[in-house]
Image (spheres, coloured by chain):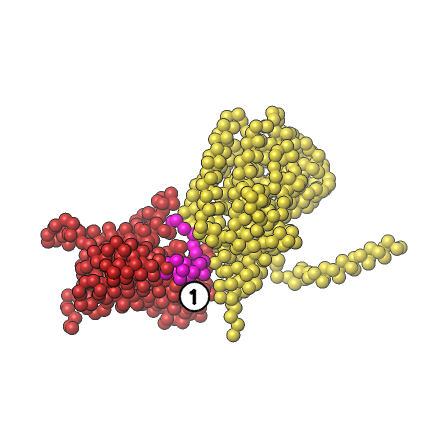
Amino acid sequence: MSNSFELCVGPIHPALKEPIQLDFEVEGERVKNVSFKLGQVHRAIEWAGMRRNPIQILYLAERICGICNVCHPMAFSMALEKIAEIEVPKRAEYIRVINAELERIHSHILWAGVAAHELGFDSVMHYTWRVREKVLDIIEMLNGNRITKGVFMIGGVRRDVKKEHIPKIRQALQYYRDCYAKLEKIFLKDASIKARTRDIGVLSKKEALKLCAVGPTARASGVKKDIRVDFAYAAYPWLDIKPVTPEIAGLKARGDTFDRILVRLLEVKQSIDLIEQCLNDLPAGPILAEPVLQKLLVQLKGVEGESIALQEAPRGELIHYLKMAAQDSPYAWKVRAPTYANLPPLIPMLSGCEIADIPIVAASIDPCISCTNRVVQIDNDDSILSMDKLRELSVQKTNKILREVKK
Amino acid sequence: MTMDFSVLLFVPVFSITAILLGLFFRGIDRKLGAKMQARIGPPIIQPFIDLKKLLMKENIVPENAIKWVFNSMPLIALSASILVLLYVPFLGFPPLLSGYGDLILVLYLLMIPALALAVGGFSSGSTYASVGAQRELVLMMSYEFAFSIVIVTIAWLVTKTAPVINAFSLVSISVVPVWGLVGVMGFIGLLLLLLALMLVMPAELGRLPADIAEAKTEIADGVFVEYSGRNLALLYLALDVRTIAFSSLVVALFFPFAFTEFVPLQGIVAVIANALFFLVKVFIVMFFGSIFVHVAVARFRVDQAARAYWGPVLLIALIGMALVMWGTVLG
């Protein structure tokens, strides 16, 4: 008799906030093998987008993710602005960064609460979520809504940061500076949290590079990679920003769950600084390249071309690919959310850990499953191609082209 | 010894009181825990509402469960928990069944609910429940030794210093408070024993940081995962009564003082005052052993819990035992 048995976590499980199926082969309490299946929350958003005009898509893009709903419309507008060669006013670029960094603060603090809950530390969860309310209040003050803000427009933003808003934002930033010490004490000093996260779910630097981990997950393993620095967009080129790795706190990057907590907490601090810089340098001027939407739509209708927009979402690198073919709606729109890149690293992280570690390790990449589900596999054998089949088809095609070239 | 008729009469009264008190204390527990987490929390009668709802719900038995084992375990857990209460001094009255068993029996009876949970989990045929049941057993093996050391040391102390007939009888222990039997050395020893007992308490009651067998976010409530309706109601009742029983045991061992020892009262007033005073003591024990702890820590992993109970907690109990012995023999 074999000692190992199968344990299935998901698609519905209290540790998971969204459906994903994780299959484990377990021996006693130790995990021997892991695999995962996706596709339970595919909503065909791209399909719906390709039947709408670009301004409508902005609101659709916002609904790809419940938490990072700044970066999706922002990435989409950046992609389209590149094709249509629209220049975004500088003030709008700064306001975009302010919104993106406010989102990063609320996303990371929300995540910290979820992580505490996965550890069974509900007091911390309630504390962090109460602290998070402040940033949501600021977002509501700026944009009129807490989560789905509808603030982006092709060629700028729809709502300005007014003069009377600035002292309130500064006050909130000060509030977070004050809270930060307490959060740091809870997450980095508490013995019971440390015992559950140090050297648990380790992702080595080599593996992070090999599996193309992105965002805080990669940075916690010591990979210095941040789209805001490497491919600076919006107002980031003018801001003082460095990729956050555990080395910044004077620690060696071990790539464990603790490091991922550390990196996210440090990023909250970084975001506070970035917003402060933005408020100091906020230039005057318009916030929209083309305020009349009808004109803008006509302009966008005529554009042709393709582009890729990169974004550093709270969870990591986000890619929007867009192809316009002088029509109302895009010819193609493809989204690659950060979690898509961060799921394969889960396998080395989870192999060899214990059942008790599964929730916190799985949560440590801050998975956003509904962002990731961009395709669904239906049970039709003809439509599924294996690697070998694909290669065979490619060889056939190459030979065909070669023959045509020779003629 | 013939069974007194009044005992038969009092058993149902005590059982119902115990269940009501268990639910009431659970309500306070949840409310206080919520307040400490800056939440509003459920009303204090919430456990009663939950119980009513569960009793109305369908009782589902999984297809691949061993049905009679699966169905009988909640009953066994509840009756064992109630039985413990009949052996410890409760509400200021001497134990109802004193003379029919002693501390050693209580020690065993306290193990039964945990065992019943584990067996129920194994019999349910669910992987999550099996993992939970394994964890429950590992945990039990870890804390039982430290727990027994505390009990045996106190019994030994009572035999050695107070001339009583049966040292393991809870009546004799509650008549002679242990604190009066020792010198300074023994006093420190007893404090350590009390600390060890309080540290065992979360594991014994399946509360954080040792709610490893349930571990909602890991194994979806573990041993409870397949239980529903009436069975689940019985299991919750068993846990609530066990909380009261264990706290009463701690009170009986370490704080057996009656209210009337401090304020002379007569008749029915004295009985009521003693009962209320007893409830306050039980609440204080529960507060430090369970409510306060579960809002202040994260969950242990089962290996960490086992290491903690075989290591530091056992050490505290052993040092406590050594100090008590040293103090008693030399003093």
Residue B144, how many percent across, how many down? 35, 64
The quarter holding residue B120 reads bottom left
The quarter of the rendered structure image containing the C terminus of chain A is bottom right
Residue at label 1? B134
Question: Which chain is assigned red?
Answer: B
Question: Which chain is assigned yellow?
Answer: A
What is the magenta range?
B295-314
For this view, does B196 lie left or right of residue B64? Answer: left
Q: Regarding mark 1 in the picture, which secondary structure is present there? A: helix
Question: Up-down: is A128 above or below B330?
Answer: above
For this view, does A401 lie left or right of residue A289? Answer: right
- Does residue A360 appear in this view? yes
Of residue A330 and residue B226, the one placed in the foreground of this image is B226
The residue lying at 30 percent from left, 67 percent from top is B108
The residue lying at 63 percent from left, 44 percent from top is A225
The residue lying at 51 percent from left, 63 percent from top is A30
Magenta-colored stretch includes residue B302: yes
Q: What is the crowding at mark 1: few (fewer than 14 residues within 10 Å), some, or many (at least 20)?
A: many
For this view, does B111 lie left or right of residue A267? Answer: left
Of residue A185 and residue B55, the one placed in the foreground of this image is A185
- Among all residues in the image, which is located at the extreme front? B330
Specify the principal SS of the magenta part.
helix
The residue lying at 33 percent from left, 66 percent from top is B111
Residue A102, how many percent across, how many down? 53, 37
Question: Up-down: is A173 above or below A1?
Answer: above
Return the chain for callout 1.
B
The quarter holding residue B1 reads bottom left
> What amino acid is at disc 1?
Gln
